[in-house]
Amino acid sequence: MRANETDRLSKGKVLLRYLNKANDLLKIFEEFFLASAIFIMAFLQIANVVARNVFTPIYFTEEVIMMLIIMVTYIGLGYGARRARHVRMSALFDLSPLKMQKFLAYFSLALGVAVMVFLGFAGAEYVQRLQAMKQLTPIFSIPYWTFVIIAPVGFFMAALRYVVAFIRNIVSADVWIGSDTKNEYDEASIEDQAGI
């Protein structure tokens, strides 16, 4: 029995190594994309306000900003799952013993994977419907589905992050709540955030 458990853990560590590489590549893409998109949105919004008050409005900015908001929302979903920066109820979790925390982590991560995969497939169906409708954006006349396709991608990226965290919980004694985040209760950091 002991040899089987050791074999299972070593296979989990090998799988985790590959998932970590994918996770790291996605991390670079996400952080670059999110920072760039937010900068572009801010720049376009400011430029449009100045243009509207001084010259004439830049009409395409609203469409570009709308598309970037859609993209930032769904790319940010994977980022939030990686960093465990999502809404969670942690009072019961934090007060539980370590074994119960592990169980709750497994349960919530498995549920997160299931929900994200379900929403990813639902998003893919929605994209297919948009393709069939041949809906175009008003100003650029670009197929609308080309921007919305990021929704199922974001859901599947979040599911991958939950899978990585789930496997980390299997191969590690620590409790992982995100693919890059352990469950750590640090009173000093909470006081810093609260401004105490």
Image (cartoon, rainbow, N blue to C red):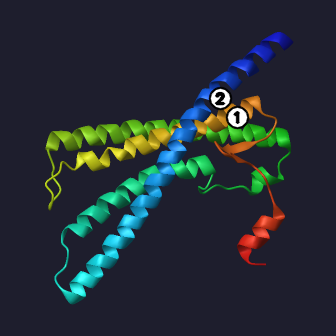
How far, Cα to Cα, is label 1 from label 2? 7 Å
Q: Residue at x 22, y 50 (%)?
A: 144
Q: Quadrant of the N terminus?
A: top right
Camera-side residue: 65 or 173? Answer: 65
Which residue is most to the bottom?
54
Q: Residue at x 51, y 42 (%)?
A: 26
Any part of residue 89 in sight: yes
Circle 2: is it few (<14), some (14-19), or many (20+) Cα within 10 Å? many
The residue that label 2 is drawn on is 16
- Indicate the secondary structure of the residue bearing disc 2: helix
* Dot 1 and dot 2 residues touching (CB under 8 Å): yes
Q: Quadrant of residue 2?
A: top right
Placement of 121 over or under 134, stated as above or below: above
Camera-side residue: 52 or 164? Answer: 52
Left/right placement of residue 93 relative to residue 22 reads: right
* Picture coordinates of residue 118, whole percent (x, y): 44, 37
Q: Residue at x 26, y 46 (%)?
A: 146
Using the image, tell me which numbered label, if any, was put on residue 168.
1
